Amino acid sequence: MQIIRNPLEWQQQTSTHRQAGRSIGFVPTMGALHEGHLSLIHQSKQENDITCTSIFVNPAQFDNPEDLENYPVTWDDDIVALEAAGLDMLLYPAQGSMYPDNYTYKVVEQELSREFCGEFRSGHFDGVLTVVTKLLNLTHADRAYFGEKDWQQLVLLRRMAEAFFMETDIVPCPTVRADSGLALSSRNENLTPDERRIAPWLYKIISSEMTVAEMRETLEGKGFRVEYLKEFEDRESKKRLLAAVYLGNVRLIDNVER
Ligand code: AMP
């Protein structure tokens, strides 16, 4: 597995593969890898000649410096998992190298990005859309893989790729869950043992037959602080119920078909 720290070198290497006629699948991540990330990599390996991943904890998408500081880092384990998954190339950008402009240029979406998570995490999706644009420009990927766990992000990225005539297909991948139903997330690492016992109720409750009002009440009864619990409808897919909740300081999101 090749590990590249310089974005321009990465761009050159991926371009060489593309010119040689090899298809490229790309899986951007923020590290602290789990089976959810690895499922994206496995899918990419089935559909492409070369599979690349990036590990970059993107400061531009954090609205809260404490949240950025507490974001889990498990570098050594990540490398072992990526090697075992048979990854070809890893971009691990050197400090500052992704923002030579100091983030004076941004990709901004003005409607959906202000709702749901965007209502509570100001500037979050500007950061996501900007970094994914940079990564796609660097990678020459035929396909880029994103998890349905981050449903709003996936919709925004799919629409962005369409809006800017991007050449990379945005491929949605199903949410990977623990046996308890809890959606795997890097942030689960920060749950206390007690919170870990409560967390699986999120999926149990939002996938139940209750009304949204009953779900909210039940979640609060279990000890969750509900940030939002709201239905989302778009042209491209069936109605979804999107949820963001807190357990202590840990923010969890999930979504289900409705
Ligand atoms: P992150 O490292 O959290 O930015 O996630 C990187 C990619 O992995 C994103 O496309 C996520 O949607 C996806 N992902 C994270 N957790 C899961 C999961 N449990 N199942 C499927 N995909 C996931």
Image (spheres, helix red, strand yellow):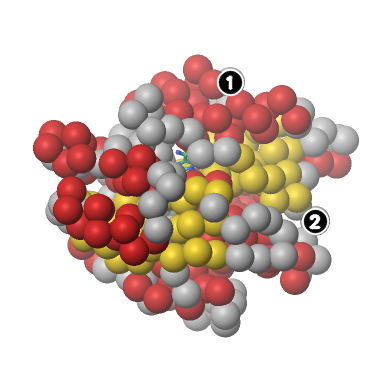
| Ligand 1 closer than 8 Å to label 2 CB | no
Disc 1 C-beta below 8 A from ligand 1: no
Dividing the picture into quadrants, the one containing residue 90 is top right
Image location of residue 78, percent across then percent down: 40, 30
Image quarter (top left, top right, bottom left or bottom right) of the N terminus: top right
Q: Say which residue label 2 marks.
A: 167
Residue 191: % across, % down: 19, 42
Residue 180 visible to an observer of this rendering: yes
Visible residue check, residue 251:
no
**Residue visible at 55% across and 44% down?**
147
Kind of residue at badge 2? Glu
Q: Position of residue 9 (x, y in %)?
A: 62, 47
Residue under numbered circle 1: 86
Q: Nearer the viewer, residue 81 or 91?
A: 81
Q: Which amino acid lies under the numbered mark 1 shown in the image of this protein? A: Gly
Instruction: Give the answer, above or below, for where 3 lies relative to 60.
Output: above
Left or right placement of residue 91 versus residue 75 in this view? right
Q: Is residue 211 rendered to the left or right of residue 71? A: right
Reply above or below: 26 against 48: below
Q: Earlier in the sequence, mark 1 or mark 2?
A: 1
**209 and 97: which is toward the camera:** 209
Q: Which mark is residue 240?
A: none
Determine whether the residue tagged by mark 1 lies in a helix, strand or loop: loop
